[in-house]
Amino acid sequence: MSFRRFLSAGLLLASLTTNAQTLAKPATGPAMSQRMADAFISWHPDSILIGTRKTARWDYEQGLMMKALERVWERTGDARYFTYIQKDLDQFVLPDGTIRTYKLEDYNLDNLTTGHALLLLSQLSLGSQATQQKYVKAAQLLRKQLDGQPRTQAGGFWHKKIYPNQMWLDGLYMAEPFYAEYSKLFNQPAGFDDVAKQFALIEKNLVDPKTGLLYHGYDESKEQKWANKTTGQSPNFWDRGMGWYAMALVDVLDYFPANHPQRAQLIKDVQRLAPVLAKYQDPKTGTWSLVVDQATRKGNYAEASGSSMFVYALAKGVRMGYLDSKYAAVAKKGYDGLLKTFVATEGNALAFNGTVSVGGLGGNPYRDGSFEYYLSEPLRKNDLKGVGPFILASVEMEIAAESALGKGKTVAVDNYFNHETRKNNLSGQTETWHYTWEERTHGGFYLWGNQFRELGAKTVTVPTAPTAASLKGVNVYIIVDPDSKKESPQPNFVKPADVQAVTDWVKAGGTLMLMANDTSNCEIPRFNTLAKAFGITFTNTSMNMVKGDQFEQGLVKFPAGNAVFKTAKTAYVKELSVLDVKSSATPLVSTGSSVIMATAKLGKGTVFAIGDPWLYNEYTDGRKIPDTFDNFEAGKDLATWLLQQSGR
């Protein structure tokens, strides 16, 4: 490392230590994840420019930032983040699904990372089939690259065509989560076997048996000057390389089938890595060093991107149940270190310091993987390879701070009384839809389900009639919009046995939510045999009949001091069935003399009722209704209240 670069890195680190501030979430205002996302958008208002480039091009840093913005969108319901993703993609994705600046024949795994954003838009309601299809075709184009991607003799993807016989840790994040998500959405189960193989090859060829750390890359041919002539491994443990791998592990598991034979091994890989990360965490700062195992060596320094990635992987691993809860403390210490060491304020915005610009092997000029090489790469402020993982880490830490409420609790949505089916646009398989946890189109409960999950609860589906057995272990049971014969050829109507089973379950302490619909879109009479057991009737009177985009006609105001909606002030609820409430139930929200929401108690249990499924994605994702309505916040308020009742 040159003295000049060493001095530059040292001065910058000294500056960070002196000037960075401990920035906790303000008493009021956005959370840290949102504040950093807003800062990023202020730096890149029109297009994502990477490093010192003058023009934007299809890039893995672009994909990383889009994933971070997607998570902030899911946490806030603020459509600005979604809009940014779509506008950026639209600079590249043409109507026929081709991608500007992307070259399949480069066979570069880095180019696959933005595929996540394509898959996101492939699943959403976007106004026209043609609009959605261009993203589907673009995702298929990226997937086609994998069919021809050069491989090692053992079957591992070359990191790039220009790097023969080489697997790098970076490539696991660039390709595998996209590959796994694509395999799930397009119902291509063989893809999971291939994804698992890539991780198995990394574990076999890059894990150091003495330390448990992972070398940056290996050359199967052992021809590269940087490659160990016996193992093919590069010489050092680079923090961001390990960070890419750690994030890839916890992200790919989001899509792996529960019954896949290699899923358990991937979880074991996470569990193998966690204690290694804990061991090499700086006990004072909570951060990790650029060259992970040589923290005290002259010139080495705490590095922002790898540290952020480790915090993210550990926190998510705990949240998803892959890791023991003791690693939450490791993640918390690491996150505090990120705030103290790398996050600073500049004016009214945030800045993120201390990210090494790049790290690679081979090429021209040649990168030999030595300690001196890694330290020779310059540090950058607001580098997206640090900013993106910091946002993702912030999201995980914000979830961790609120997830105790739902821990150990299960929220079930009925898929028996409501059982409409359709052909999935991507997989071609028949699926149930309308008010399901998995559905990301307008009519799904994906975002509301995500709020339950981020409060610590497990979301499941009950596909059968309610019985003591089917409701065993369920804390919150949601029945929404039972089918009429118009909606389902053979609808499952509510029967007396169903009423008895549900009322027994509520009496024993269950929390029940009943969501009807206007009378033309819901089987009201038989549904009422259940609702009446709790003193509530869905009437034939409909209100809030919204015409076109006159959204104000759907306004519902929450009364001050009500027991449920502590944050939300208003909601948009259209064409709802007015409730008739008897003395055993209590009106919660009314407009004039019309009761819109009501609650009831029976035995140890609680019931909430409303005449509309108003919390589906169309009215919570921020893209359609004006931001004067608080549906997203109301969904979280209601989820919180339902989980609170289930613990009483």
Image (cartoon, helix red, strand yellow):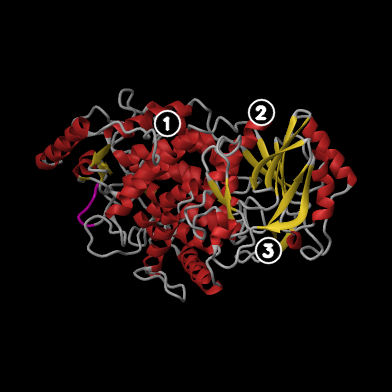
Q: Please identify the dominant SS of the magenta region.
A: loop
Q: Residue at x 80, y 48 (%)?
A: 464
Q: Earlier in the sequence, mark 1 or mark 2?
A: 1
Q: How far apart, in angstroms, are the residues tagged by discs 3 and 1?
A: 40 Å
| Residue 523 vertical position relative to residue 320 in the rendered view, above or below | below
Q: Earlier in the sequence, mark 3 or mark 1?
A: 1
Q: Reply yes or no: does residue 301 show up in magenta.
A: no
Q: Viewer-proximal residue, 525 or 393?
A: 525
What mark, if any, has residue 647 been given in the picture? 2
The picture places residue 199, in percent across and down from the top left corner, at: 49, 46
Asked whether the beta carbons under mark 3 and mark 2 sit within 8 Å of each other, the answer is: no
Q: Earlier in the sequence, mark 3 or mark 2?
A: 3
- Disc 1 residue crowd, few under 14, some 14–19, many 20+, Cα 10 Å: many
Instruction: Label 2, secondary structure: give it.
Output: loop
Instruction: Label 1, secondary structure: give it.
Output: helix
The residue furthest right is: 496
Residue on which the image places disc 1: 331
Quadrant where the N terminus is found in the figure: top left
The picture places residue 616, in percent across and down from the top left corner, at: 61, 54
The three-letter amino acid code for the residue at tag 1 is Ala
What's drawn in magenta, residue-wise? 364-368
The residue furthest front is: 592
Q: How far apart, in angstroms, are the residues tagged by discs 1 and 2?
A: 28 Å
Residue on which the image places disc 3: 429
Asked whether the beta carbons under mark 3 and mark 1 sit within 8 Å of each other, the answer is: no
Asked whether the beta carbons under mark 1 and mark 2 sit within 8 Å of each other, the answer is: no
| Residue 602 vertical position relative to residue 223 in the rendered view, above or below | above
Corner quadrant of residue 32: top left
Q: Viewer-proximal residue, 386 or 450?
A: 450
The three-letter amino acid code for the residue at tag 2 is Gly
